[in-house]
Image (cartoon, helix red, strand yellow):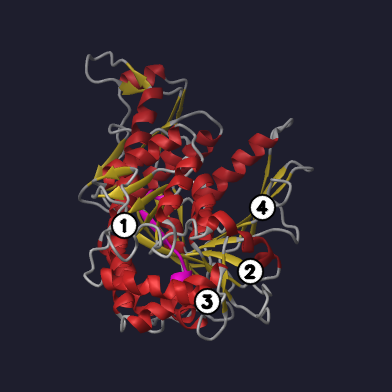
Amino acid sequence: MLMLRLRLPSPCSSRMRASLLSSLSSSSCRRRFLLSLSSSSKFLRHRDTTGSTACIAIRASSTGTAGTGSNSTPLQILPEVSEAIRSNRPVVALESTIIAHGMPYPQNLDLSRDLASILRNKGVVPATVAVKGGVCRIGLSEVEMADLAVSGQEKRAGKCSTRDLPLLLARNGKYKTVGSDGGHQWGATTVASTMKLANLAGISTFVTGGTGGVHRGAETTLDISADLYELARTPVVVVSAGVKSILDIKLTLEQLETFGVPAMAYGTDEFPAFFSPNSGIDAPLRVDNAGDVARAYWSSKELDLPNGMLVAVPNNDPAGESVESAIHEALVEAEAANIAGRDVTPFILERVADKTSGDSLRSNIALVKKNASVGADIATAIAVESAARANKGRRQYFIAPSVRGGPPLPTSRVIVMGGAVIDLLARPMEGHDLIMATSNPGVVSESDGGVGRNVAEALGRLGACPILYTAVGSDSLGHAIVQRLEDECGVVGTDTSVSFVSDMSTSTYLAVMNSVGDLHTAIADMSALSRIPIPPPEILREADILVM
């Protein structure tokens, strides 16, 4: 285990400590880190815990700073998801209740795989959200998805809304409710809790089947879904087939208006009713493409609005109308059986499935898949818009006239010239010796390196806003390492300072360690560094410091 201790300047404000914590957290997503901050000693401790399954564990104490006390609550992100978030690649969150409780096995597992394929085919990373063993999970492995799919029927999954999260985490996933034995292994997240956790992880788009709302008869029962309250306070775009048709759609839209939540119908003037595209109620707003949603999302962020957005996609499956009729019949049965609250939806879905000979299940699957396709487009548009706005913002701060009469060039008091390298460290599994001339089971970790890049990052975090002159391959690794420097470290990269070499790969250093952690052998592919550009004279004249 590696422990880095960084002494902070004194006096050191809580804002500065929080800023450094946030920076280190986001820049190290690719590896497994546990961060802890001690405000009393003014030390930032950064522990590398690279090892098994999760990518990030950030523990936040009740005082608002990071800590390691018993009251801390971890958030673990799958490495693939973490890397996508850090690289500003599109990610779509998916709830786990629809898998654990919303559909029978094995259709639920098949759906989860189909959704992942739909998203991946559009270049989007899926991230199923759930709670397991008292840990909030952002992204699940194939094995975990298979276990989640059977957990509902095996009574190993409890429905987990936002209100349930604190106690579920405090009891390490064992949340005893009336009628349960308190032995749940999974917390299946609802729309509300999925929104909350997705936002904490930095995911902007969430795809589900239908959202909750104002229940019929709410004027006497006050039964209003927590989904609406979460939409009012969590800035996530929720893509669904509209409000669940067992609810009062008109009152739900009025409640969303009161909460300041945009409710947008996608490509239609009529607000969808989950199974059916026709509710008989005009949509408050209409959008016709993902770009409009993305621009609205970022405009809302710029206005510092706290709310999310609801995008309702019409379900055109032909079975919708017969399903709607069956829903109304099931509502009457639920009332007669005194079924209420969170138990209504599972009861209705089961009864409707019986009445429609499976039409409801097929229609439900179809609408979720369509939502995933639209959600993928929205997540991609949000990522593209994010990059465009970030580039525009950066160029506004570092522009100076060119003395040669050409286009303006970014300037800085600090210029850094040097390598940007991807470092790969491979070692055999603990307790295993390295065996020559064969494959060894082990662990491979990846990090950003290169002396020039490291110096530029340190100066950027100190606020020097350096310009880095380096060369990388015109590949995904090269673009990602430069993007991370710009987005997370305050380093300025320009079209003239970074050379993206088309006929070479990004420089990579691969070290193979033996069982005791000593270097066994290494390979350094540094050919791209021969293409590092030289700063033009007008840039050098403006600079106070040149680091080579």
Residue 417 placement: quadrant: top left
- The x, y position of residue 267, in whole percent, is 23, 49
**From this viewpoint, is residue 170 visible?**
yes
Gap in Å between the C-alphas at discs 4 and 3? 46 Å
- The x, y position of residue 281, in whole percent, is 32, 51
Number of labels in the image equals 4
Task: Give above or below for 7 relative to 85.
Answer: above
- Looking at the rendering, the stretch of residues picked out in magenta corresponds to 86-99
- The x, y position of residue 220, in whole percent, is 58, 57
Q: Residue furthest right?
A: 40
Q: Mark 4: which secondary structure?
A: loop
Q: Mark 3: which secondary structure?
A: helix
Q: Nearer the viewer, mark 2 or mark 4?
A: 2
Gap in Å between the C-alphas at discs 1 and 4? 44 Å
Gap in Å between the C-alphas at discs 2 and 1? 40 Å
**From this viewpoint, is residue 89 visible?**
no
Q: Nearer the viewer, mark 4 or mark 3?
A: 3
At label 3, the amino acid type is: Ala
At label 1, the amino acid type is: Ser
Which of the marked residues, 3 or 2, is nearer the chain's N terminus? 2
Q: Which mark is residue 279?
A: 1
Q: Which mark is residue 134?
A: 2
Q: Mark 2: which secondary structure?
A: loop
**Residue at the disc numbered 3:** 336
At label 2, the amino acid type is: Gly
